[in-house]
Image (cartoon, rainbow, N blue to C red):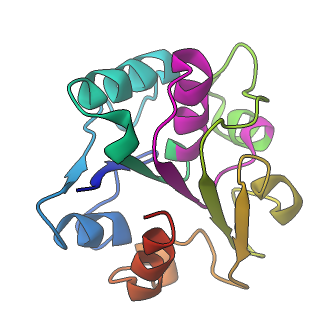
Amino acid sequence: MTNYFIVPGLGGSGPDHWQTYFETTGDNFQRIVQKDWDAPDINQWVATIETALSGYDPETVILVGHSLGCPTIAQWATLSGKKIKGALLVAPPDLEFFQEKSKVTLFNRLPTDKINFPTIVVASTNDHWSVIEKAEFWGSGFIKIGDAGHINDVSGYGKWEEGLKILSLLG
């Protein structure tokens, strides 16, 4: 059985967000809960992923990240060196832009290593937190879904059935 771990971004993905919908689709979906969704500490967020995955066979794990959850997954992949089944990375932000706009320093060094397990990046052409050319960096697969904003509930992505179909491509 595949174990899906939801990795939200800033704010934690509310009740109408597609990540919350994904959680309701099976007992093998669970959210990784961060200590503070509104003041991200990337080192702590990475450690929380590591703790959540302990006790699971890495070959059964798929991470499902949105926004700031995507570079958190990338940082975890770099620091842990673990090879999991895969990751779906939706709407990864442009980190330099994010840090400048939010005035929050997240990384001493931005993650630049390629992720060492299969990934699918899903990005929008009009995401206010990203530039489409930067969005595909961590993905071994890339899906550009057109003008979809930040691919969240505000952009109309609550019950995102197409996202579940994309997720199934990872196994």
Q: Is residue 2 above or below residue 149?
A: above
Report if residue 71 lies within the magenta region: yes
Query: How far across and down, in percent of the image, does residue 31 sit?
Result: 25, 48
Query: How far across and down, in percent of the image, does residue 87 sit?
Result: 51, 51
28 lies left or right of 138: left
The extreme right residue here reads: 133
The extreme left residue here reads: 27
Residue 100 figure quarter? top right
Query: How far across and down, in percent of the image, does residue 28 sit?
Result: 18, 57
Q: Is residue 91 above or below residue 125?
A: above
Find the magenta span and give its range.
70-96
Query: How far across and down, in percent of the image, does residue 30 sit?
Result: 21, 50
171 lies left or right of 139: left
Residue at horizontal 76 percent and vertical 29 percent from the top: 113
Question: In terms of depth relative to the viewer, which is nearer, 159 or 59?
Answer: 59
Q: Is residue 85 above or below residue 123?
A: above
171 lies left or right of 145: left
Q: Is residue 35 visible?
A: no
Residue 128 figure quarter? bottom right
149 lies left or right of 47: right
Residue at horizontal 38 percent and vertical 86 percent from the top: 161
Residue at horizontal 26 percent and vertical 73 percent from the top: 21
Q: Is residue 164 visible?
A: yes
Report if residue 19 lies within the magenta region: no
Question: In terms of depth relative to the viewer, which is nearer, 17 or 31?
Answer: 31
Q: Quadrant of the C terminus?
A: bottom left
Q: Quadrant of the N terminus?
A: bottom left
Q: Give the total number of marks visible in the rendering.
A: 0
